[in-house]
Amino acid sequence: MARAPFNGKKMVEAAEAGELSPTQVRQALKRASELGLYAEAKRLTEFLVQANEFADDGAPKELKERVAKGISLLKGLGYHPTRTQRKLGKKGVVITLNDIAIKPTVGDNFRRMVSAGYKDYTTEAIVCDYPQVFSKDAVDASTLKLKKFK
């Protein structure tokens, strides 16, 4: 049986609109890669994780979406932050990011994201951009870490 025609651009548009499940995104990503549609495949990696997978903790929608995109980008780089994702699902964005941010050292995932050009999607950048949501300690620690990597 022949496969249905694949339109990478339409799949990216559907992912952007939130019309694809994570499984459908992974399938589209695989198909785009098989067909050599690398630009579309790269865009699809941004939607591997969706904000509705996180526990509802009252965090703003745009904050949750940015965290989801950051985790998706990290997965697209070949890293799978399983414990972080599990905690996001159980505790939500605020507690999870607070706990990561207050750690005194820069984590491996921070380094990976910065090296790949995704600094804006690190926990530290997100915490600094939403200081009203996170603890003062988390914001202060994040600010220091970001200054070290300018």
Image (cartoon, rainbow, N blue to C red):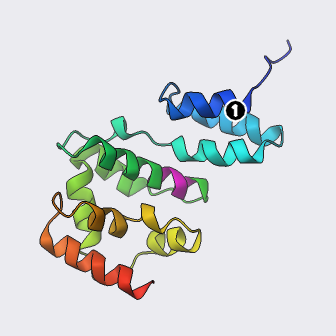
The residue singled out by tag 1 in the image is 9
The residue that appears at 49% across and 75% down in the rendered structure is 111
Is residue 69 found inside the magenta-colored segment of the image? no
Majority secondary structure of magenta residues: helix
From the top left corner, tell me how far across and down residue 60 is, in percent. Answer: 24, 44
Of residues 46 and 74, the one drawn nearer to the viewer in this rendering? 46
In the rendered image, which quarter is residue 35 located in?
top right
In the rendered image, which quarter is residue 25 located in?
top right
Q: Residues within 10 Å of mark 1 (few under 14, many from 20)?
A: some
Answer left or right for 130 relative to 6: left
The residue that appears at 26% across and 51% down in the rendered structure is 93
From the top left corner, tell me how far across and down residue 71 is, in percent. Answer: 46, 53
Of residues 53 and 17, the one drawn nearer to the viewer in this rendering? 17
Residue 49 vertical placement versus 119 (above, below): above
Quadrant occupied by the C terminus: bottom left
Answer left or right for 49 relative to 8: left
Answer left or right for 20 relative to 133: right
Is residue 74 found inside the magenta-colored segment of the image? yes
From the top left corner, tell me how far across and down residue 115 is, in percent. Answer: 57, 74
Question: Do we see residue 24 in this rendering?
Answer: no
Answer left or right for 122 relative to 78: left
The residue that appears at 20% across and 57% down in the rendered structure is 95
Quadrant occupied by the N terminus: top right
For the residue labelled by badge 1, is the local secondary structure a helix, a strand or a loop? Answer: helix
Going by the numbered disc 1, the residue's amino acid type is: Lys
Q: Which residues are magenta?
A: 71-75
